Image (cartoon, coloured by chain):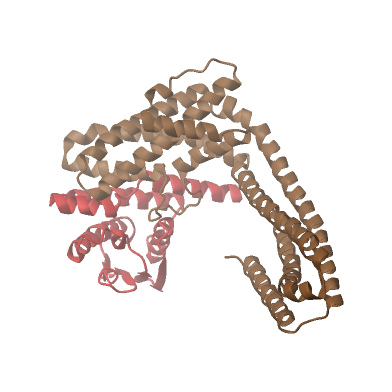
Chain colours: A brown, B red
Amino acid sequence: MNHSRKLSIAILLGTSVVASFLAWRNITSPIDFADLKTVLTTTTATFGSLLGIITAGLMFTHGKFSELASELGEKSPDYLSGTLSLEKAQTIGNSLLALRKTFSLLETQATVEEEKNLYRRVVEKASSMYTKLAVLSDLMLMQQGLAKTDLMISEMDSQLYVNYREERKQVKREWHILVTIRQMVDTWEGSKTLVLEKYEKRTSLQQDLRNSISLLGLKERLDKNSKHVRAETEEIYNELAEDIGKIGKQLYQDRIPQLLSQMENANTIRGKYFYLALVFIATPLFINILILPQLSIGTATFFQPIISITSSLSVMGIAFLLLYINRILSV
Amino acid sequence: MSRVKKTVEEQMRALLTKHGYPPPEVVIPILEKAGRGEKELGAQLHEIDMSLLSGIMKILNLKEKNMRTVSRMIGVIFSSYGQKYEPIELSENRFRLSVSDCPMLHVGKNVNTTVKSKFCDVYCSSTAKAMAQLVLGEEGSCSWDKALIKGGRKCTVTFDLVKTK
């Protein structure tokens, strides 16, 4: 956790404690009717003003999100027509299918659980990449105004087809194409740092394949008949490494991962602003419609705890807002 | 300057990807079940270590055959695999380091300590042999105390150079 986040949490906790203390003090010591009315009116006004600021923040984050979406949307057609052509998609698809076939067989032949798991991971990742590639292939045909072919779909089994349909449904905007490409590259490459994810739970397909090739190399020493499997896998590995490596390089050159991450942040903050706006709309409505019209000395005594809490909430609301403004400036 | 640095990093990544060790957490249960293959594993590891270490020497342009070179090469390999290590001693004749993590610790719990200890020797002796062949010469030796496998917090690895007259 970084320093600024720790500070933000400390401020938030501090404010919550102060607000709770003030609320508790007001509940335990009754205040007079006129003061209570002033508190309610001030609280309503505070919530109203904050709502205005929150709405501005919501619009700002939405603007940032739209700006990034449009920048990515402009870049995505280049990826479908240049970086990833139909021919290349076909070549990568064939390699992934070959991997799937070989490692499914190896998985059934393996008797040790750890070995089975390694081969299963290769099958799962190759399948996941294949479905994403099939979606991209569809979009390429659409972009080029060509008739849809079922070439890649015909090679799928029922489960793979279900996954493909799911993936296809998720691509609704142009920038979603880049998300799919990035996910495909990430499945292959994993982390971009020098440290290999050897002991991390999520390894890359590249790492699983290297481990498998190394393991097959050992098996080859023990049993000469398994020689062709290692050689074929190594050949496929080299082809994939070259093809996907180029796509990955292009993605990083165009700063796509950074832009997508910024979009994700903007989207998260936009969502939080939305819920915050709902709270700040609901609270003044609650005060104005339910409490204020019925406020007599009797009801004031009855509503006093609620009024104390809402007025404390308005103090906390200001703290929340300051924190969000701080976050928004870093998007 | 940054371009040069990037090239070294890229070369190193390619080297480590090309010459990957067979994963102990998978290999050991297989060989344990088969009851054979230690010798073949040792031969494969030695080939990998020779390619890997000579590759590192070439990329980093390490020409001097001394303990400093050993320490740099060990540093590169350990940090590339995300393995934490701490140098304890570096002199003309000795390089000692301690490691707080070991690939053997990631081997399944159902594999007993004796088997882990045996394969620890297979993996470590291969690197030690390659290091002696490439950097230290015949006077070089390496030892490891296997403390991590025995339940200790750190394992100490020592490279020694005994100068003969």
Q: Residue at x 56, y 29 (%)?
A: A83
Q: Residue at x 63, y 66 (%)?
A: A5
- Asked whether B144 or A81 is in front, the reply is A81
Q: Is residue A146 above or below residue B21?
A: above
Q: Is residue A137 above or below residue A261?
A: above
Q: Does residue B90 appear in this view? A: no
Count numbered badges in the picture. Answer: 0
- Asked whether A41 or B87 is in front, the reply is A41
- Asked whether B154 or A90 is in front, the reply is A90
Q: Position of residue A176 (x, y in %)?
A: 59, 36
Q: Position of residue A285 (x, y in %)?
A: 77, 58
Q: Residue B161's image quarter? A: bottom left
Q: Position of residue B19 (x, y in %)?
A: 35, 46
Q: In the image, is A237 to the left or to the right of A273?
A: left
Q: In the image, is A85 to the left or to the right of A126?
A: right
Instruction: Tell which residue pokes out farthest to the bottom in this image.
Output: A29
Q: Residue at x 71, y 79 (%)?
A: A27
Q: Position of residue B12 (x, y in %)?
A: 45, 49
